[in-house]
């Protein structure tokens, strides 16, 4: 019997070791009905606090597949019949959709205990038939809550002294469905007693944590209104006195900022539309196909350009007065807030920028772009206009204007993609100046720190990508400035963090930008609100031998492989009611030392 168990432990170890040594994250199947995969612990909410972003093994049940008469696998739940092929296909599609919705599936408690025992044996060098194996990643097994405690996860993690595995920590995660009865929640004394019962410590520490939503999705009349943007704040503090207590002002607070571009409520929305038109041009150059948007102007692009040139020819004012006038008369008519205007509107748009504003609101074809630019180049060639431009303008049209000052203009063939190329340069030039105007004007950075984003040495596609990054940075800063009212020093630090991040990372609206902050700065946002996540943790021991017992209360389940019996929706339970409901998740830990 003992040799059989040890043999199974070694076989299980070999599968895990093979999975750990592989570079990819593809799942593997064990014993036909167990799926094992490797991922970072922070991808699973309930494991995040214990594993962070370190790699872990996840064991779960394989989604069952049935086989048809021809031994073709079907993700099917209904019985096979003699219906026609169309009915079979429809049934199979329904079954696939059903099983897709089920998500990850748990193993039985008995099977989960067996896997943990194999993991533990394989790491114990004192077991005679087991080699001195290198440490494995932590193992976590999804459970079906079939035991009296309602266990949803079992976990195991090696404890090492130097390069030698000296023991394992065994974890159990138990969950309860949502309740509005705070009296039924575990108390701090009960949490401490649970810890003492397992570990008999001479001293204990207790820490609190909480997360609040400051900005993003909201619940109105029990209906979730989703937002792609969110700002949450995480608190950590010591000396917890009661369950669900409000974090004290002495807490360590960290903002988690995730902002999606394109929100119509954002002060940056009009700039986003301008950027989207720029992206349309870039995509057209890259793919050869362009999806033109509805023009914002009723007058055609060509007629707008003609009127603009005639106005320049007829005016008797100085070039400076012309620039000021056009800046006022050519801004997009929007319903954006005064906040947006004070942030990003410039009063110094030069000729090329004013032309861009007109064209981006009116062109609907490559022909439009070519015809408009032909009118401009002819007016320059014949000396009909002497427009003013910024000294640091870098677009092809700006260079032609500079040449026109000396009555020498290079011939430009406005055929093929050349007009689109020229218009894209005009937009890049204008929008870069818009962003610089805000960032430098608010003293959030310097030109030296913006060199990566302003470089014209890279190709146009890369310039657009970098401009998108700069736009996303501004979306983040403006959100934190407008809606949270963060002070200058925090906005400055956030700007530097975003600039550094995007120098080495791809554009990603799902990324959470972190910013440490004093709780007093945002106390009015959270002190009268309910947390979406609240936790208390009792700990004892030090270093790798530290053991913890914790409880987490949340407005939605932290476990996705079981369905809880509750009168509230499984997604979220807190609406506008005065008594919020919480799911309860308790994590207990045991330390097993190898002799």
Image (cartoon, helix red, strand yellow):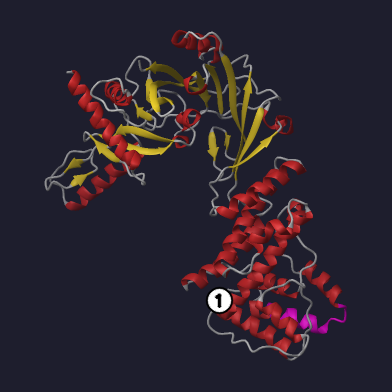
Give whichever of 1, 393 is nearer the camera. 1
x 60%, y 74%: residue: 363
- Is 312 part of what is drawn in magenta? yes
| Residue 436 pos. (x, y %) | 72, 59
- Badge 1 marks a residue whose secondary structure is loop
Report whether 122 appears left or right of 294.
Answer: left
Predominant secondary structure in magenta?
A: helix
Q: Quadrant of the N terminus?
A: top left
Residue 401 within the magenta-colored segment of the rendering: no
Quadrant location, the C terminus: top left
Find residue 500 and report its horizontal and vertical position in percent.
63, 50
Asked if one can make out residue 261 in the rendered structure from this viewpoint, the answer is: no
Task: Say which residue label 1 marks.
Answer: 365
Q: Nearer the viewer, residue 182 or 495?
A: 495
How many labels, in total?
Answer: 1
Image quarter for residue 561? top left
Viewer-closest of 522 and 2: 2
Q: Position of residue 84 (x, y in %)?
A: 16, 51
Residue range in magenta is: 304-318
List x then y, in percent, for residue 491.
72, 45
């Amino acid at each position: 019997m003992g040799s059989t168990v040890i043999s199974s432990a070694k076989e299980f170890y070999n599968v895990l070791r093979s999975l750990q040594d592989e570079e990819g994250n593809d799942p593997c199947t064990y014993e036909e009905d167990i799926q094992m995969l490797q991922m970072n612990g922070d991808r699973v909410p309930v494991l995040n606090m214990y594993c962070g972003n370190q790699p872990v093994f996840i064991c779960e049940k394989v989604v069952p597949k049935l086989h048809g008469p021809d031994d073709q696998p079907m993700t099917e739940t209904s019985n096979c019949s003699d219906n026609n092929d169309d009915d079979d296909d429809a049934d199979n599609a329904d079954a696939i959709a059903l099983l897709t919705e089920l998500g990850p599936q748990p193993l039985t408690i008995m099977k989960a205990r067996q896997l943990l025992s194999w993991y533990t044996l394989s790491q114990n060098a004192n077991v005679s038939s087991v080699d001195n194996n290198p440490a494995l990643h932590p193992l976590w097994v999804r459970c079906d809550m079939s035991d009296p405690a309602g266990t949803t996860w079992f976990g195991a993690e090696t404890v090492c002294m130097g390069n030698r595995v000296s023991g394992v920590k065994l974890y159990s995660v138990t969950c309860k469905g949502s309740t509005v009865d705070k009296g039924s929640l575990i108390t701090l004394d009960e949490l401490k007693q649970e810890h003492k019962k397992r570990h008999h410590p001479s001293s204990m520490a207790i820490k609190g944590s909480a997360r609040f939503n400051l900005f993003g999705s909201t619940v109105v009349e029990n209906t979730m209104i989703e937002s792609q943007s969110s700002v949450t704040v995480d608190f950590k503090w010591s000396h917890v006195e009661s369950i669900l207590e409000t974090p004290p002002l002495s807490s360590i607070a960290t903002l988690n900022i995730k902002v999606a571009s394109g929100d119509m409520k954002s002060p940056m929305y009009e700039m986003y539309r301008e950027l989207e038109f720029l992206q349309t041009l870039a995509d057209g150059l890259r793919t050869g196909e362009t999806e033109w948007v509805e023009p914002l102007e009723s007058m055609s692009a060509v007629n707008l350009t003609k009127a603009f040139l005639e106005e320049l020819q007829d005016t008797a004012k100085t070039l400076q007065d012309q620039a000021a006038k056009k800046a006022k008369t050519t801004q997009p008519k929007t319903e954006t807030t005064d906040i947006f205007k004070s942030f990003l509107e410039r009063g110094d748009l030069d000729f090329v920028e004013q032309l861009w504003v007109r064209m981006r609101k009116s062109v609907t074809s490559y022909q439009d772009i070519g015809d408009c630019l032909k009118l401009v180049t002819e007016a320059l060639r014949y000396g009909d206009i002497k427009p003013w431009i910024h000294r640091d303008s870098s677009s092809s049209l700006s260079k032609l204007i500079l040449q026109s000052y000396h009555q020498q203009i290079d011939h430009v063939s406005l055929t093929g993609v050349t007009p689109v190329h020229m218009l894209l340069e005009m937009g890049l030039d204008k929008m870069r100046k818009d962003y610089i105007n805000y960032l430098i004007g608010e003293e959030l950075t310097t030109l030296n720190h913006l060199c990566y984003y302003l470089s014209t040495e890279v190709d146009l596609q890369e310039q657009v990508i970098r401009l998108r990054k700069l736009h996303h940075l501004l979306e983040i800063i403006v959100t934190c400035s407008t809606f949270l009212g963060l002070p200058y020093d925090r906005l400055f630090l956030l700007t530097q963090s975003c600039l550094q991040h995007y120098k080495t990372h791809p554009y990603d609206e799902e990324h959470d930008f972190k910013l440490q902050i004093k709780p007093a700065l945002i106390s009015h946002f959270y002190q009268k609100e309910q947390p979406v996540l609240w936790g208390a943790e009792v700990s004892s021991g030090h270093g790798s031998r530290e053991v913890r017992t914790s409880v987490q209360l949340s407005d939605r389940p932290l476990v996705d492989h079981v369905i809880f019996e509750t009168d509230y929706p499984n997604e979220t339970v807190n609406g506008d009611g005065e008594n919020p409901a919480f799911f309860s998740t308790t994590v207990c830990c045991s330390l097993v030392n190898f002799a």
